[in-house]
Image (tube, grey):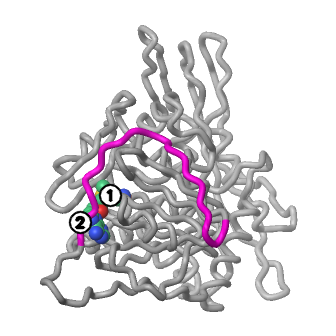
Amino acid sequence: MGGAVSAGEDNDDLIDNLKEAQYIRTERVERAFRAIDRGDYYLDDYRDNAYKDLAWKHGNIHLSAPCIYSEVMEALGLQPGLSFLNLGSGTGYLSTMVGLIVGPFGVNHGVELHKDVVEYAREKLDDFVKNSESFDKFEFCEPVFVVGNCLEISTDSHQYDRIYCGAGVQKDHENYMKVLLKIGGVLVMPIEDQLTQITRTGQCTWESKNILAVSFAPLVQQSRADGDKPDSVQLPPLSVRSLQDLSRVYIRRTLRALGADGEGREAGQTRRAPPQKRKRRRRRCRRRRLNAYVFGGNQLIPQTMESEEDEEEEEEGGVMVVGGRQAEEEVVEQHRKLGGCGGEEEVEEEATKLEEEEEEEEVGGERVRDIGEVEILKRANVLRDQITALPLPESLKAYLLYYREK
Ligand SMILES: C[S@@+](CC[C@H](N)C(=O)[O-])C[C@H]1O[C@@H](n2cnc3c(N)ncnc32)[C@H](O)[C@@H]1O
């Protein structure tokens, strides 16, 4: 399955293509796709293929094609706070994207048949939490994966708002899947070669809609000797977050809100500069030292921090560019807001530090990408800077940063 859109060079390229082909239609879904690099779920030797619209299978590891995931994410109609169950959760790629949308007050569970695949998914999740720039730009509901056959979920299990099944469902199992849904919930699954969206409209009523013709490997059936009772799979409990964890969520949320750029940009949202005919930009940055103040108890403590500012911008071809300057201003602005008292003051200018040129060309209708605003925004981890600047003990800052190394 797949091959519906042209191959990309990187994750952003792939998402551009999925958007252009109308597989990705909403901003919320687009942001989640951009935040999670599909290549990170590939083994290193195969990574080059990650940005093609193709499924990938290696041993027990199996990823569906990007066009399928896009349709699934759109059809699920995800919202913050919803509970999600992924049947055949595989590498955790989809579950991680879902976690960025349902957020810290959602539920994110996965059941996967193969133990080695669940271990792989946990490693990938750990890598995302520890190393991804996206992690600090979103509120996240960490997926919890359990090993087991999803056709043997214990009958007293809780129900979910959203369910996806990543392998082909036999008609015999349709009802089994449907009763896992809460009333008002949405189930998306491949059944009879159709990706189907089912909404539970009442205790005994469901509405069904075919989304896309697909071809999926079938769910592995229960294997047991005749007469044996099936091992029932226990889904993870619906646990409540600890007060400490909730505090971390709210502190990070508050700092992120302080860092918003005033243009209604949501967490993790990035803008991509439109394709330019031809531009040439010269940028010079100078380093400024700023005085800011932070609250320590009920006292204001002066702190010195440095920021960079563009001094000059030159363009060719009459194209206006918003780019690095804005991203950097954002960082400066956040430092200012963190100070919270309007105490910013320029005290010293140093010699020009950096001069750089950036070029972008449109050649024969094909855009050649340069480092643009998106890249700069992605690199600026504002939340991290904000937390690091807080007048708190190091151990508390490390907790607020989820003990991330980068
Ligand atoms: C196409 S992959 C899904 C990949 C997943 N969406 C991801 O993001 O990586 C289908 C997965 O379903 C799993 N699977 C198949 N039959 C299953 C069953 N009966 N119970 C649980 N998992 C099953 C497979 O092992 C495989 O990992």
Residue 212 drawn in magenta: yes
From where the camera sits, is residue 103 visible? no
Q: Which residue is label 2 attached to?
A: 220
> Would you say the beta carbon of the disc 1 residue lies within 8 angstroms of ligand 1?
yes
**Marks 2/1: CA distance?**
8 Å
Please provide percent x and percent y for residue 261: 75, 50
Closer to us: 42 or 161? 161
Closer to us: 175 or 252? 175
Taking the image in four quarters, ligand 1 sits in the one at: bottom left
Q: Which residues are magenta?
A: 202-221
Looking at the rendered structure, the kind of residue marked 2 is: Val
> Would you say the beta carbon of the disc 2 residue lies within 8 angstroms of ligand 1?
yes
Looking at the rendered structure, the kind of residue marked 1 is: Ala
Please provide percent x and percent y for residue 346: 77, 53
37 w.r.t. 172: above or below: above
299 w.r.t. 142: above or below: below
- Residue at 43%, 77% in the rendered image: 144
Q: Quadrant of the N terminus?
A: top left
Q: Which residue is label 1 attached to?
A: 167
Task: Kindly indicate the quadrant of the structure image that contains residue 291.
Answer: bottom right
Q: Answer yes or no: do the residues labelled 2 and 1 have beta carbons within 8 Å?
A: yes
